Image (spheres, grey):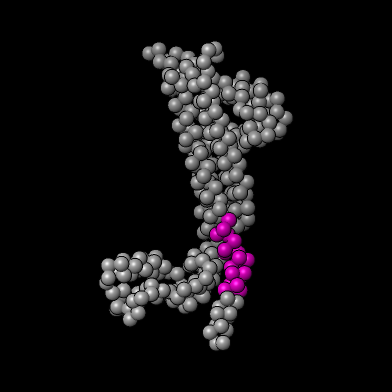
């Protein structure tokens, strides 16, 4: 009965600390910051290939010829167009995800840094008017029509063939959901050359996003440390008091070593003392972490 009571008590303690941890402001801040970081990393993974694809389509002669061909077999050009569509969809969707999910990050900042964030955001939009257009382009390609690509070819210095990939302004303006981006489209003229927008916009947005995330982490440092103490408490419950998680990697490495020792017919060792284990028939104590249900230390 005593053993059952201990097990029930541990289960109750784990549920209690889990509830406290889920509601804790430090833990909530960590979840928010880490999730935005994940989305940002995904967007970065879209931005770099898109820039490379646009560069290739504007400098590779075969690609230029395929994209600008308007009679005969257009298979190669259609395949490249689909790649451009795929890349653009991913880029603008990822951009909006980063922008939208970053907004609550501002609430984590100190009052002074909230003002700084507003100032920085306004400066970004002033320096990069294409930012609003690219964000609104997401709604166009997701809810209205595919991108109105326009492909052009010219001969440059030394008669080298050069390409230009643009979006046709007239077709863009048929969509009525541009809001403040409409003036940017009109000011661009008949078409918007897309490649010169991508890298500067990405770098500016990346710098601002990284500043937000790093500043939020610093501003929430005290709450995050308190949440870490709860995580350590949770780890002690999960491991029956064996570890708070600070040495988790070392313990797992020791478990792997004891597995190797068992397979090789060598004595397994105690994690804390390094001495041979008395009972070598079981690996449960190999890392001195009792068998537990649920997840391991965070």
Q: Is residue 108 left or right of residue 154?
A: right
In the image, farthest residue toward the right:
176
Measuring from the top left, give residue 257's x and y in whole percent. Answer: 32, 67
Q: Is residue 58 above or below residue 253?
A: above
Quadrant housing residue 162: top left
Q: Is residue 146 left or right of residue 59?
A: right
What residue lies at 43% left-to-right and 19% top-to-bottom? 62
Depth order, front residue of 127/78:
78
Q: Reply yes or no: does residue 20 show up in magenta.
A: yes
What residue lies at 53% left-to-right and 12% top-to-bottom? 72
Measuring from the top left, give residue 296's x and y in whole percent. Answer: 48, 67
Q: Is residue 50 above or below residue 266?
A: above
Depth order, front residue of 3/148:
3
Measuring from the top left, give residue 31's x and y in whole percent. Answer: 57, 58
Q: Is residue 8 above or below residue 69?
A: below
In the image, farthest residue toward the bottom:
2
- Give the dominant element type of the magenta stretch: helix, strand or loop: helix
Depth order, front residue of 149/105:
149
Asked if one can make out residue 280 in the rendered structure from this viewpoint, the answer is yes
What residue lies at 53% left-to-right and 55% top-to-bottom? 34
Quadrant housing residue 122: top right
Q: Magenta residues?
A: 13-32
Asked if one can make out residue 229 in the rendered structure from this viewpoint, the answer is no
Measuring from the top left, give residue 107's x and y in whole percent. Answer: 63, 55
Quadrant housing residue 289: bottom left
């Amino acid at each position: 009965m005593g053993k059952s009571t201990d097990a029930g008590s541990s289960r109750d303690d784990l549920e209690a600390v889990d509830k406290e941890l889920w509601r804790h402001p430090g833990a909530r801040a960590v979840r928010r910051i880490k999730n935005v970081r994940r989305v940002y990393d995904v967007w970065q993974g879209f931005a770099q290939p898109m820039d490379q694809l646009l560069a290739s389509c504007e400098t590779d002669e075969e690609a230029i010829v395929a994209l600008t061909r308007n009679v005969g077999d257009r298979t190669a050009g259609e395949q490249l167009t689909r790649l451009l569509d795929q890349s653009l969809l991913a880029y603008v969707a990822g951009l909006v995800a980063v922008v939208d999910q970053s907004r609550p990050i501002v609430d984590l900042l100190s009052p002074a840094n909230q003002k700084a964030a507003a100032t920085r955001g306004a400066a970004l939009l002033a320096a990069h008017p294409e930012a609003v257009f690219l964000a609104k382009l997401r709604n166009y390609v997701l809810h209205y029509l595919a991108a109105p690509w326009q492909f052009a070819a010219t001969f440059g210095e030394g008669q080298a063939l050069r390409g230009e990939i643009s979006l046709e302004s007239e077709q863009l303006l048929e969509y009525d959901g541009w809001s403040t981006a409409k003036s940017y489209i009109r000011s661009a003229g008949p078409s918007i050359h897309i490649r010169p927008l991508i890298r500067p916009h990405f770098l500016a947005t990346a710098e601002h996003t990284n500043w937000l995330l790093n500043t939020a982490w610093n501003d929430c440092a005290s709450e995050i440390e308190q949440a870490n103490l709860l995580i350590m408490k949770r780890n002690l419950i999960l491991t029956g008091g064996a570890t708070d998680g600070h040495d988790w990697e070392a313990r797992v490495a020791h478990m792997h070593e004891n597995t190797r020792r068992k397979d090789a017919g060598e004595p397994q060792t105690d994690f804390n003392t390094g001495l041979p284990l008395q009972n070598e028939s079981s690996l449960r104590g190999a890392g001195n972490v009792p068998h537990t249900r649920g997840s391991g230390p965070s």
